Image: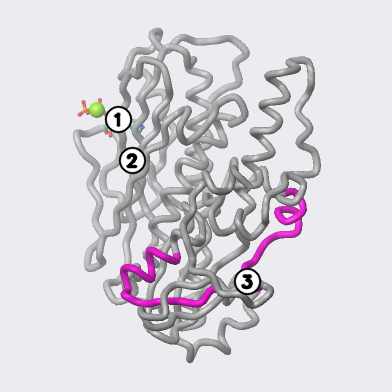
């Protein structure tokens, strides 16, 4: 892709159109549905008899990411995968993205090339075409907006509002890792600020660091559902924490649920590091967020098909609305499920 340069090239040297041309020069459209990509006033896509699924997300420097510990290549990759996650959570297949960036002269061409190499890597891994975007200036911080577009058969699309009483409540992968990874990065940043000579001690923490810096979207889940001949009744991706997402499904579906603490999947590294930070691992899973796993409900008749699937955990069941949304703790006590957000976590 971009050639390796050790020097710094100012963005002014290229101008807006030069920069767009430079960043998009290696794009080869892969999908039949991508009729027209970068280079006209609008992209053209053709999904024939399918439905179109669209989602967008904005990432703002200082709010959603911190460039002191986020490599730009990872940031580019993550800005794509978090958007694709929203398309997979509809049980749809993403095909195209548009990327809009606001830049200040603080960034060199080489820095933006890094960002785009992460974006391009994600496009290749997920089979997506970058078909357009916008480039503009910012007074200081970096802003990245990605719009993802995908397709699905109408009958396969899964909404948040379809959960039914007695459905199984399920989640892919494991939870809490991204939040604990963030705590580690924030700790090292603090140490570095106080003692600039000290090198960060991040060794042996690859899994949780990747969960935070370079998350993957669950591309495999729609395929697993297809293979098992299952259509979830409701689905959502976990961006804000398990508790918040369960409450979204239950509120929108007009149901209650019982979530069992002992069933929540937590990786051993996440568990151990959380403890070292004096954080409750369950709270990290419930309220940490950014795991980009899929939370879904299925009819109980599918129990046999999913009970031994290594990618899926059954964490509870859907009940009637009047029973409320409950967390059954490991000791058996029942608490109303609350979406506490990050503030509550930090006070622990
Ligand atoms: P307009 O003036 O009509 O907004 P632009 O000059 O902004 O057009 O964009 C020209 C082409 O380059 C369009 O196809 C647009 O989608 C694409 N483009 C602009 N910025 C980016 C970007 N950051 N990444 C990818 N494509 C971009
Ligand atoms: Mg434009």
* Residue 343 rendering spot, x and y as whole percentages: 52, 44
Q: Residue 55 carries which label?
A: none
Decide if residue 214 is on the left or right side of residue 85: right
Q: Can residue 1 be seen in this view?
A: no
* Residue 165 rendering spot, x and y as whole percentages: 39, 85
Q: Is ligand 1 closer than 8 angstroms to the Cβ of mark 3?
A: no
Closer mark to the observer between disc 3 and disc 1? 3
Asked if the residue under mark 2 is in contact with the one under mark 3, i.e. CB atoms within 8 Å, the reply is no
Q: Answer few, some or many: residues within 10 Å of disc 1's Cα (few below 14, many 20 plus, some between 14 and 19).
A: few
| Residue 284 belongs to magenta span | no
> Disc 2 on helix, strand or loop?
strand
Disc 1 marks which residue?
A: 134
Closer mark to the observer between disc 3 and disc 2? 3
> Disc 3 on helix, strand or loop?
loop
Question: Which segment did they paint magenta?
Answer: 246-273
Rendering quadrant holding ligand 2 = top left
Decide if residue 194 is on the left or right side of residue 6: right
Q: Answer few, some or many: residues within 10 Å of disc 3's Cα (few below 14, many 20 plus, some between 14 and 19).
A: some
Residue at the (53%, 19%) spot, across then down:
110
Mark 1 or mark 3, which is nearer the start of the sequence? 1
Asked if the residue under mark 1 is in contact with the one under mark 2, i.e. CB atoms within 8 Å, the reply is yes
Mark 1 or mark 2, which is nearer the start of the sequence? 2
Q: Is ligand 2 closer than 8 angstroms to the Cβ of mark 1?
A: yes
| 204 or 243, nearer to the observer | 243
Disc 3 marks which residue?
A: 329
| 55 or 126, nearer to the observer | 55
Which colour assignment does the render follow? one colour
Q: Residue 98 carries which label?
A: 2
Q: Is ligand 1 closer than 8 angstroms to the Cβ of mark 2?
A: yes
């Amino acid at each position: 892709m971009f050639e390796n340069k050790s020097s710094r090239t100012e963005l002014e040297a290229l101008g807006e159109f030069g920069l767009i041309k430079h960043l998009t020069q290696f794009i080869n459209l892969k999908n039949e549905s991508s009729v027209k990509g970068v280079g006209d006033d609008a992209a053209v896509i053709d999904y024939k008899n399918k439905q179109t699924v669209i989602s967008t997300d904005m990432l703002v420097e200082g709010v959603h990411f911190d460039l002191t510990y986020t490599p730009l290549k990872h940031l580019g990759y993550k800005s794509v995968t978090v958007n694709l996650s929203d398309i997979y959570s509809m049980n749809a297949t993403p095909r195209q993205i548009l990327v809009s960036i606001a830049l200040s002269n603080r960034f060199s061409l080489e820095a933006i090339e890094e960002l785009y190499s992460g974006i391009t890597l994600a496009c290749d891994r997920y089979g997506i075409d970058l078909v357009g975007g916008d480039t503009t200036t910012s007074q200081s911080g970096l802003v990245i907006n990605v719009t993802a577009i995908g397709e699905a058969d109408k009958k396969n699309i899964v909404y948040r509002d379809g959960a039914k009483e007695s459905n199984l409540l399920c989640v892919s992968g494991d939870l809490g890792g991204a939040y604990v990874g963030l705590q580690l990065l924030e700790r090292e940043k603090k140490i570095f600020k106080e003692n600039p000579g000290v090198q960060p001690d991040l060794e042996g923490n690859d899994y949780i660091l990747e969960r935070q810096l370079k998350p993957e979207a669950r591309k495999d889940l729609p395929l697993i559902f297809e293979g098992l001949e299952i259509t979830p009744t409701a689905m959502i991706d976990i961006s804000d924490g398990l508790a918040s997402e369960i409450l979204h499904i239950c509120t929108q579906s007009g149901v209650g649920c019982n979530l069992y603490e002992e069933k929540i999947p937590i990786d051993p590294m996440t568990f151990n590091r959380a403890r070292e930070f004096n954080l409750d691992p369950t709270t990290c899973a419930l309220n940490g967020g950014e795991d980009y796993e899929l939370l879904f409900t299925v009819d109980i008749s599918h129990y046999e098909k999913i009970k031994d699937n290594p990618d899926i955990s059954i964490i509870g069941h859907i009940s009637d609305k009047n029973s409320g949304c409950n967390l059954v703790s490991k000791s058996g006590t029942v608490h109303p499920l609350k979406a506490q957000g990050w503030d509550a976590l930090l006070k622990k």
